[in-house]
């Protein structure tokens, strides 16, 4: 088995092959902002689509929403974010570098300027980004960029319950951007100030949350397997009572062995009826749910599985990265880098590679590529030697390469190469879509 890649290896590959670039790079970048390139956006969209298919479409007890990013500021008062969504901040009095107080030993010299005994006392720093609606920059127009997607599921609960005709237990899912003015972003896309979440608020009766919690924990592990994250690098961490978020009665973090250490990948929290109760109190709207069959009335409780999109993608890059010895045409061996993504998540499912730029070959190859592109994501590459093109496709994780050669013009067959085994088979061009369909 391949060893764990370093972060440098992952970051370099991501840039070299077009998965992820530094944001605003031609202007010298913007601290810890990253842009997803042509391959990154495919991988990210595939993750989000698979998640939605798995957790929303493939179940009868789930519906989705796509809410506005900016919400009435009262939402964040009710949720507790205005009051408690803080990190403790210390500043070096000498160089003015700022650190999260829980990430730095203030007894030691400043890690930025090397001076000792210069830190301020910790002060609370609210992580929400503020902006203003409309042209007046005054308190009355302050709004926040949402720091989690979750609150919209609570705020929209009554509308969703009424219109979707779902009966508790049921869940509301949402995928979208969240923003946090992190004091210490870093480790590539692991901690950024702008990121994406895939969240579920699962509404349950006041009794029996333990069973739902265990069921969701298993469901989260199943998802991890489905998306090809190495399960041997996964750990559960029971968050101690005194470290729980203000809304949570129990939280289990699912952690992953990233190259920089074991850190949170996902979280599962029992949020009780905290959020709906607070929104009832702050909005004056009754959040009581009446069971249509038993007529029982209660404020629903909530189990929340939450998944970071960017952390999923990072864990997947780390899990998929493989270095192997591969035989060369001359009989030697060379190192080959292969991204072993599950085929349904790979940025491209197929690459079509005409052996040469001869127009008669390109005509057949382009037609095949366009046929396949109606169903899957397809790369078409005609430059460089076929060996180098295979290596490139291995490195971006394309499960199948189809080579169209001069024999193809006579026998209507092409060579299909498997990314993982490197085995090549010759099959009729018209059978290629079915071949791929069966393997996916
Ligand atoms: N609604 C609950 C909630 O937001 P959280 O643990 O603060 O809980 C959920 O965030 C998930 O969002 C995390 O498990 C992680 O995957 C992702 N996440 C949180 N902060 C992040 C950041 N600054 N950058 C990238 N992903 C982040």
Image (cartoon, grey):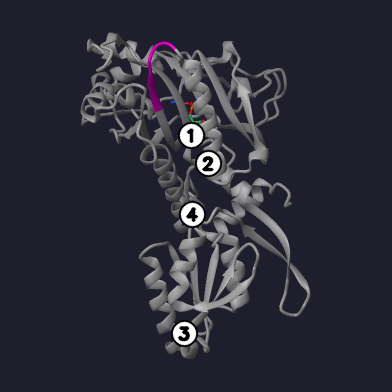
Horizontal side of 244 relative to 237 (left or right) equals: left
Q: In this view, does 160 lie above or below 395?
A: above
Name the residue carrying label 3. 412
Q: Are marks 2 and 1 in contact (CB under 8 Å)?
A: yes
Whether 41 is drawn above or below 104: the answer is below
The answer to whether mark 2 is within 8 Å of ligand 1 is yes
Is-magenta flag for residue 126? no
The span picked out in magenta is 201-207
> In this rendering, is residue 76 above or below 370?
above
Identify the secondary structure beneath mark 1.
Answer: strand
Of callouts 2 and 1, which one flags the residue occurring earlier in the amino acid sequence?
A: 1
Q: Name the residue beneath numbered marker 4.
A: 344
Eye-nearest disc, 3 or 4: 3
Circle 3 crowding by C-alpha within 10 Å: few under 14, some 14–19, many from 20: some
422 or 297: nearer the viewer: 297
Which residue position is annotated with label 1?
A: 307
């Amino acid at each position: 088995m391949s060893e764990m890649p370093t972060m440098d290896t992952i970051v370099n590959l991501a840039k070299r092959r077009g998965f992820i670039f530094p944001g605003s790079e031609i202007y010298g970048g913007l601290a810890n902002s990253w842009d997803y390139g042509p391959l990154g956006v495919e991988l990210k969209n595939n993750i989000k689509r698979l998640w939605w298919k798995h957790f929303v479409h493939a179940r009868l007890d789930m519906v989705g929403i796509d809410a506005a990013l900016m919400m009435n500021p009262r939402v964040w008062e009710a949720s507790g974010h205005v009051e408690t969504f803080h990190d403790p901040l210390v500043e070096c009095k000498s160089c003015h570098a700022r650190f999260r107080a829980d990430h730095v030993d203030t007894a030691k010299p400043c890690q930025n300027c090397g001076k000792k005994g210069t830190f301020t006392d910790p002060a609370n720093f609210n992580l929400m980004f503020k902006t203003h609606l409309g042209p007046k920059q005054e308190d009355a127009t302050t709004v926040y960029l949402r720091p989690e997607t979750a609150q919209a599921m609570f705020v929209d609960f009554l509308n969703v319950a009424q219109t979707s005709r779902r009966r508790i237990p049921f869940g509301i899912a949402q995928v979208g951007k969240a923003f946090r003015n992190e004091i210490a972003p870093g480790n590539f896309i692991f901690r950024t100030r702008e990121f994406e979440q895939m969240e579920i608020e699962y509404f349950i009766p006041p009794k029996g949350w333990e069973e739902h919690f265990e069921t969701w924990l298993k469901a989260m592990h199943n998802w991890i397997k489905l998306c090809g994250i190495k399960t041997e690098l996964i750990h559960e961490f029971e968050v101690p009572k005194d470290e729980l978020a203000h809304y949570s009665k129990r939280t289990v973090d699912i952690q992953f062995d990233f190259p920089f250490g074991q850190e949170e990948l996902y979280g599962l929290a029992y949020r009780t009826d905290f959020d709906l109760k607070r929104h009832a109190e702050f909005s004056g709207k009754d959040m009581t749910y009446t069971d249509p069959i038993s007529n029982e009335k209660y404020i629903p409780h909530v189990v929340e599985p939450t998944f970071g999109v960017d952390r999923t993608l990072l864990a997947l890059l780390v899990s998929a990265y493989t270095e192997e010895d591969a035989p060369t045409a001359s009989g030697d061996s060379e190192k080959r880098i292969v991204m072993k993504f599950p085929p349904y998540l790979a940025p491209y499912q197929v690459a079509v590679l005409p052996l040469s730029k001869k127009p008669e070959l390109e005509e057949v190859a382009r037609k095949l590529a366009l046929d396949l592109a109606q169903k899957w994501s397809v790369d078409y590459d005609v430059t460089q030697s076929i060996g180098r093109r295979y290596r490139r496709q291995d490195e971006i994780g394309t499960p199948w390469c189809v080579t169209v050669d001069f024999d193809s013009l006579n026998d209507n067959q092409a060579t299909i190469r498997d990314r993982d085994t490197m085995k090549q088979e010759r099959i009729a061009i018209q059978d290629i879509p079915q071949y791929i369909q069966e393997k996916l």
